[in-house]
Image (cartoon, rainbow, N blue to C red):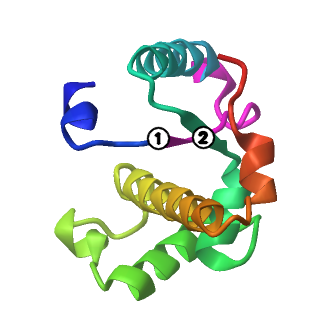
Amino acid sequence: MDVLQENNVRAVGLENYAFGAFPHTLVQMAEATGLLKYFLHQSSIPVNLYTPSSIKKCATGKGNAKKDLMYDAWLQDTEIDLLSVFNKKKVVSPIHDLVDAYYIACCERAENIQQSKGFPNEEANNQRDDSR
């Protein structure tokens, strides 16, 4: 939390749960996310949740994009070849995690720009976590 506060972070974007993806890790993921959201709330940092499909749509224009298409978008946007950096032949963790994090930040930035111009992002507003 100190790093976020020292860098004047105004909001945090997180990927919302994909319940069908990994049912065996759902409890651990929910507990960890709950703790993170609690500490962010204690630090007065709002949390915005994005569905996996909205992140994919932000990256590729398709809400059902596969990891390889997400990576292709990353490569086009950043010109950073993470496959080479991590010496991998296919998109695996942590590569797809980094790509997802990048596009969550893009979603968050797009929402902040729209809000600063007085045009709220309806999809992001629907995903925002107001249950704290």
What crowding class fits label 1: few (fewer than 14 Cα within 10 Å), some (14-19), or many (20 or more)? some
Q: Quadrant of residue 58?
A: bottom right
Name the residue type under label 2. Answer: Asn
Q: Which residues are magenta?
A: 12-25
Q: Position of residue 103 (x, y in %)?
A: 50, 62
Q: Position of residue 70 (x, y in %)?
A: 55, 70
Name the residue type under label 1. Answer: Val
Q: Are marks 2 and 1 in contact (CB under 8 Å)?
A: yes
Q: Would residue 126 be found to the left or right of residue 132 on screen?
A: right
Residue occupying the point 71% across, 26% down: 130
Could you tell me which secondary element the residue under label 2 belongs to? strand
Residue occupying the point 42% across, 83% down: 77
Which residue in the protein does label 2 denote? Answer: 48
Q: Nearer the viewer, residue 118 or 53?
A: 118
Residue occupying the point 28% across, 65% down: 88
Q: Would residue 128 be found to the left or right of residue 7 on screen?
A: right
Could you tell me which secondary element the residue under label 1 belongs to? strand
Which residue in the protein does label 1 denote? Answer: 12
Q: Vertical placement of 106 versus 10: above or below?
A: below
Tell me the quarter of the image containing the C terminus: top right
Q: Vertical placement of 55 versus 127: above or below?
A: below
